[in-house]
Image (cartoon, rainbow, N blue to C red):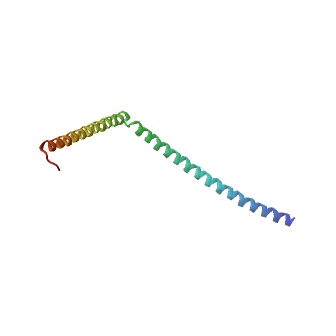
Amino acid sequence: MDELLKVAKKQLRFQKVIALCLVLIAVVLGATGYLFVNQVGQMTTALQETSARLQEIDVEGINSSISVTQEMLESVEDFSKAVDGVTEKVKEFDSWMLGLLGGAR
């Protein structure tokens, strides 16, 4: 009977250790869950603020600016072509004047 009592006491101690480990695991899981929920809440708030800021962006204004920039680039291209044409005319005039005066370079 003494032996049976000793075995029961050992089992009881072992069960107490297991119960303590389970309580510690439950506490750690609870704390981790709380931190996770807190972080998700902060992320949700940040996403809402970002969404609000994105909605404030003036897309039409940006598109208008892009259109004006494209028009300016086209006019610069036209100006460049006109300058090239004037340059050709000046070269032709220079050649004509040299031919007329009989000079050679």
Residue projecting furthest to the front: 102
For the residue pair 94 and 36, the one nearer the viewer reads as 94
For the point 14% across and 47% down, the residue is 103
Q: What residue is rendered at 66% in x and 55% in y? A: 23
Nearest the camera: 65 or 61? 65
Report how many numbered discs are placed on residues in the image: 0
Q: Residue furthest right?
A: 1
Q: Quadrant of residue 19?
A: bottom right
In the picture provided, is 18 more to the left or to the right than 27?
right
Query: The N terminus appears in which quarter of the rendering?
Result: bottom right
Residue at position x 27%, y 38% in the image: 81
Residue 95 point in image, percent of width and height: 18, 43
Residue 18: image x %, image y %?
Answer: 72, 59
Q: Along the horizontal axis of the image, is 42 left or right of 97? A: right
In the image, taking residue 42 as reference, residue 27 lies left or right, namely right
Q: Is 11 placed left or right of 88 in the picture?
A: right
From the top left corner, tell me how far across and down residue 67 is, in percent: 33, 34
In the image, is residue 32 above or below residue 44? below
82 above or below 1?
A: above
